[in-house]
Image (cartoon, rainbow, N blue to C red):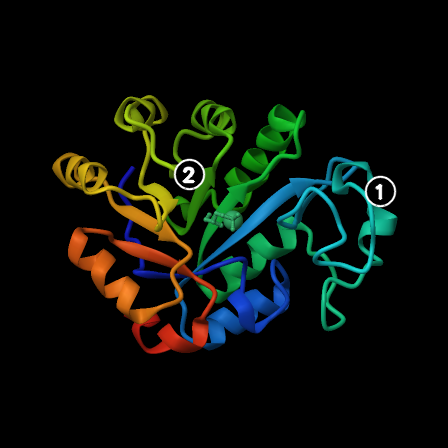
Amino acid sequence: MRIALPRWIAHRGGGALAPENTLAGIRLAARMGFRAVEFDVMLSADGTPVLIHDETLERTTNGCGQVSETADCELFALDAGAGERIPRFIDAARLCRELGLLANVEIKPAAGHEQATAETVVRMAADVWRHAPEQVLLSSFALDTLVVARDLAPDLPRSPLFELVPGDWWRIFEQLQGTALHCDALGVSDAVLAEAAEQGVPVLCYTVNDAAQAAILLGRGVSGFFTDRLDRFADQARC
Ligand code: G3P
Ligand code: MG
């Protein structure tokens, strides 16, 4: 499925200017003129999808232990930075709809929870975006979750995500009926960019915080970027 993709996507909600993966970050991205945000989604011990990047709580909250072993009552009492709470995915999704933001929902299953995470997140996304599927973009490093997405909600756009794009990425992309190719800016090769251009596949790179690096990547054929530095790209993000 082809959708309109903004060039700039706020990484982990509001990038480096707000606590990552929080509603405050998403609101900030919208206020700064960003038209798209990316955030990471994982299941709690109660099976609730929440916004968080790491499998453990220590780096981004005042809690400790595994997200997948922490009950909601404990999880939602934690401080995720500047007094923010860990958001439920459903609340982040509704906020994006309300603010008119394209949501790149990165399905980030804790190890061993791939199937349950995919089913829960995809079902919820299919419901929230049922009248606006072009406003959501599912992605994951865990490619099996995107197979679940393709089968459960074929109308929702989805993108495989790679640190290093494998040589057979196009075969994978075709099987998933992908929308864009998401990958690490540091490892993307000219061969991959040429093949993507030939196939008409947009390439979105993470994490680009430097204007000179962005200009070079654009020249090489990259379509868009995930950035932590919303302040540096706010002017361009409105376009
Ligand atoms: O989805 C792009 C980017 O967020 C992937 O890396 O580790 O920040 O989730 P990470
Ligand atoms: Mg991410």
Q: In what quadrant of the picture does the C terminus appear?
A: bottom left
Asked whether 217 or 105 is in front, the reply is: 217
Name the secondary structure under disc 1. loop
- Of labels 1 and 2, earlier in sequence is 1
Q: Residue at x 64, y 66 (%)?
A: 19
Q: Quadrant of residue 59?
A: bottom right
Residue 71 badge:
1
> Badge 1: how crowded within 10 Å, few (<14), some, or many (20+)?
some
Cβ of disc 2 within 8 Å of ligand 1? Answer: yes
Q: In this rendering, would 219 be left or right of 134?
A: left
Q: How far apart are the alpha carbons under marks 1 and 2?
A: 29 Å
Cβ of disc 1 within 8 Å of ligand 2? Answer: no
> Badge 2: how crowded within 10 Å, few (<14), some, or many (20+)?
many
Q: In this rendering, would 144 be left or right of 238?
A: right
Classify 128 as above or below 115.
below
Name the amino acid type tagged 2: Leu
Asked whether 229 or 116 is in front, the reply is: 229
Asked whether 185 or 195 is in front, the reply is: 185
The residue where tag 2 is placed is 161
Viewer-nearest of discs 1 and 2:
2
Q: Position of residue 158 (x, y in %)?
A: 40, 37
Number of numbered labels in the structure image: 2
Name the amino acid type tagged 1: Ala
Do the numbered discs 1 and 2 sit on residues whose CB atoms are within 8 Å? no
Q: In this rendering, would 210 be left or right of 26?
A: left
Name the secondary structure under disc 2. strand
Q: Residue at x 18, y 37 (%)?
A: 191
Q: Quadrant of residue 115?
A: top right
Q: Position of residue 54 (x, y in %)?
A: 65, 46
